């Protein structure tokens, strides 16, 4: 029996700036065998330690089809994330996990997939998107709809461009507020639904983002004919242990860290505080 | 009534028996502390052990789940960080634990063993022997009988002692309990039928003293589980909660925690520390969003976790053992029996 609380030591290989307050960290577990044995599903998360600061949960933003390293995209939000942002290549952190349930990729086979991301909500979807693109033949249409407050707040700008260039992916990006130099779409994420062709009966929609955005997007998708079980989202809660023991993430008798963070809308409707 | 294997020990030899226990393990028992408080503490001599006492305001929970519990040692080595899980396998005997607290420990054992087993709790528990002292004179605030947790323990103990005059009768509740008696051979002899009957009478008498049902869990459970408690009732009750967290900290079944790093030499100890679901920051997210922003949401949470059918099914018992501690410590009036009564009647008078 291993300790539930013992992290593995991981080394930062590379840090990329995404936005003024968000960075992507590329890391490997220091122990080669542990790294190779680290199996995960997109949508799962890790408890990340900055030693001396404690731990916080972050979704794995890379795909299991690219196992050489893990990537985490982190917005500076407080003590631990501040300290993490000061670390660079060669520095060590702790990783515990993977935690949570992850997306059911097998169940998405043969379907049209619509990814709807808002702001910092793109990272969990990004792991899933690469997972899908790396086995593109298993899925039907793939649409990525993404919005952020301003052009400056868009993450993975290069990748959005690369995906858009592919003929087998449709990518639409919007910002709440345009800026000089932005010649793209302006408006909240749901405006993108009118610019693409949705196929509610054959689609699964994956929705990640801030709580308000999720609420609006889900209402919109329901209106457009998506079934409750075809809308899949991730919930965020304050977490301490990530392993179903500390009770911080409980909703009723369900635990976001164990039963989630991925839930279908039909499951979300049944969660009562 | 199931046959019980029981042995008896002459009271004037108890000290010697405890000395034997002390040679093998740290013995923790209710003792008189500074200022006249009765508390659970490691003993230095058998004479310190109290045999008649008010159940201490802190249950023996903290010897299995310390308020600050180091779980990982973090050190900076020559080749980077070195991490090590901290395992506490120190042998302990918890002596003179009341039946409500025995049930509380059984509850904690269950939640830490369920789903992903929590080694740091389980190893400590595995090295701990629980010796119950039954309650022939139930305490004034207790309502253990309402949660099936007393006044005599039915399970969860290694040994259960009952005071039958000049003798202590010891029931064996586990293999370990049996071994403990075998190891201290010469102190105990098998109980006679008459001695067993004496113990039985004590239990019947204690049950009669507790006979008036004071906490109706079943009817509260029906309402809590189906969301049939008016929001306004939660609001009114929550006006009487000062958010101090005392009910959580003295409760033998509460186990919520946070995880923090503490300086230790030139490294850190990662510790789990008690936390309270009644504190607003318990669910505060980094974004500033708080799903349980209002005090009424938090008090509702506490009682959902303790008395809902959903948790009853998950944990196999209500999350209250009827020890009465929250009645004693609550600065307001939102203790378990008061809230259960309000839920049942649909009204609150503060
Ligand atoms: C499953 C899951 C996946 C996640 N994935 C990601 C991800 O991929 N990327 C990402 O960037 N984030 C992610 N998050 C969010 C991330 O975990 C938090 O941003 C992180 O925990 C913040 O930690 P911190 O120590 O930096 O902030 P903290 O220091 O905890 O504080 C954050 C903010 O809250 C305020 N605060 C803290 N305590 C209090 C208090 N008591 N009273 C008032 N204000 C207070 C602080 O002022 C600060 O502004 C995820 C969360 C979950 C649950
Ligand atoms: S809820 Fe109150 S009475 Fe019940 S076990 Fe906890 S402290 Fe004791
Ligand atoms: S984060 Fe501890 S129970 Fe979910």
Image (spheres, coloured by chain):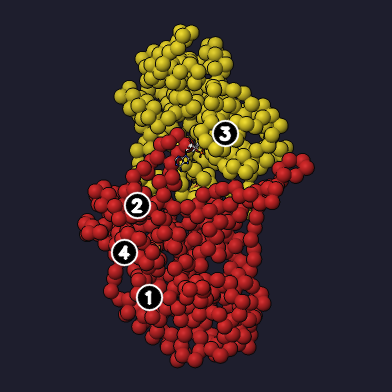
Chain colours: A yellow, B red
Which of discs 3 and 1 lies nearer the camera? The answer is 3
Q: Quadrant of residue A68?
A: top right
Residue A166 in the image, given as x and y percentages of width and height? 55, 12
**Which residue, given by chain and number where applicable, does mark 3 sit on?**
A82
In the structure shown, which secondary structural element does the residue marked by tag 4 occupy?
helix
Q: Are marks 2 and 3 on the same chain?
A: no
User: Which numbered disc flags the more N-terminal residue, 4 or 2?
Assistant: 2
**Which residue, given by chain and number where applicable, does mark 2 sit on?**
B299
Q: Is mark 4 within 8 Å of ligand 2?
A: yes
Characterize the local packing of mark 4: few (<14), some (14-19) or many (20 or more) Cα atoms within 10 angstroms. Answer: many
Residue at (43% x, 85% y) in the render: B199
Q: Is mark 3 within 8 Å of ligand 1?
A: yes
Q: CA distance from mark 2 to mark 3?
A: 33 Å
Q: Chain of mark 1?
A: B
Farthest-out residue, right:
B78
**Which residue, given by chain and number where applicable, does mark 1 sit on?**
B139
């Amino acid at each position: 029996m291993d300790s539930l609380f013992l992290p593995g030591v991981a080394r930062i290989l590379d840090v990329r700036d995404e936005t003024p307050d968000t960075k992507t960290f590329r890391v490997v577990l220091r122990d080669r065998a542990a790294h190779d044995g680290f199996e995960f599903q997109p949508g799962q998360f890790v408890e990340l330690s900055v030693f001396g600061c404690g731990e916080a949960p972050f979704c794995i933003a890379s795909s299991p089809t690219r196992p050489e390293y893990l990537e985490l995209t982190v917005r500076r939000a407080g003590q631990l994330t501040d300290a993490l942002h000061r670390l660079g290549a060669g520095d060590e952190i702790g990783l515990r996990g993977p935690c949570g349930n992850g997306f059911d990729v097998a169940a998405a086979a043969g379907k049209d997939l619509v990814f709807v991301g808002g702001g910092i909500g793109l990272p969990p979807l990004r792991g899933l998107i690469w997972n899908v693109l790396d086995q593109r033949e298993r899925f039907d249409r793939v649409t990525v709809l993404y919005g952020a407050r301003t052009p400056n707040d868009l993450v993975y700008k290069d990748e959005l461009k690369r995906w858009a260039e592919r003929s087998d992916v449709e990518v639409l990006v919007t910002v709440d507020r345009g800026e000089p130099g932005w010649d793209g779409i302006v408006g909240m994420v749901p405006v993108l639904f009118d610019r693409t062709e949705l196929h509610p009966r054959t689609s699964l929609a994956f929705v990640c983002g801030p709580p308000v955005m999720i609420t609006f997007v889900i209402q919109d998708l329901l209106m457009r004919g998506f079934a409750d079980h075809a809308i899949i989202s991730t919930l965020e809660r304050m977490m301490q242990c990530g392993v179903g023991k500390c009770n911080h993430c409980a909703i009723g008798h369900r635990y976001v860290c164990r039963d989630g963070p991925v839930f279908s809308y039909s499951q979300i409707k049944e969660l009562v505080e | 009534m199931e046959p019980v294997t029981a042995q008896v020990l002459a009271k004037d030899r108890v000290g010697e028996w405890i000395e034997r226990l002390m040679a093998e393990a740290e013995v923790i028992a209710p003792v008189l502390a500074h200022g006249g408080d009765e508390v659970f503490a490691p003993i230095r001599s058998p004479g310190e052990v109290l045999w008649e006492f008010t159940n201490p305001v802190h249950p023996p929970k903290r010897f299995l789940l310390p308020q600050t519990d180091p779980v990982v040692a973090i050190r900076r080595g020559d080749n980077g960080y070195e991490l090590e899980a901290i395992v506490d396998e120190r042998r302990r005997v918890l002596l003179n634990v009341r039946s409500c607290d025995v049930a509380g420990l059984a509850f904690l054992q269950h939640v830490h063993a369920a789903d992903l087993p929590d080694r740091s709790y389980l190893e400590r528990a595995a090295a701990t022997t629980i010796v119950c002292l039954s309650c022939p004179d139930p305490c004034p605030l207790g309502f253990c009988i309402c949660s099936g947790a007393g006044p005599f323990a039915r399970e969860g103990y290694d040994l259960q002692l009952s005071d039958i005059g000049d003798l202590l009768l010891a029931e064996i509740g586990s293999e370990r309990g049996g071994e403990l008696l075998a190891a201290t051979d010469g102190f105990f002899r098998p109980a006679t039928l008459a001695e067993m009957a004496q113990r039985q009478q004590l239990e019947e008498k204690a049950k009669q003293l507790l006979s008036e049902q004071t906490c109706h869990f079943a009817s509260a459970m029906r309402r809590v589980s189906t969301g049939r408690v008016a929001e306004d009732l939660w609001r009114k009750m929550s006006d009487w909660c000062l958010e101090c967290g005392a009910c959580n900290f003295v409760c033998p079944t509460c186990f919520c925690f946070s995880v923090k790093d503490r300086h230790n030499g030139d490294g850190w100890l990662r510790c789990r520390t008690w936390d309270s679901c009644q504190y607003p920051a318990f669910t505060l997210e980094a974004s500033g969003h708080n799903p349980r922003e209002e005090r009424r949401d938090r008090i509702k949470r506490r009682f959902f976790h303790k008395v809902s059918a959903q948790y009853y099914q998950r944990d196999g018992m209500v999350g209250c053992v009827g020890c009465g501690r929250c009645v004693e410590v609550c600065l307001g009036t939102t203790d378990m029996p008061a809230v259960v009564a309000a839920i049942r009647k649909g009204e609150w008078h503060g």
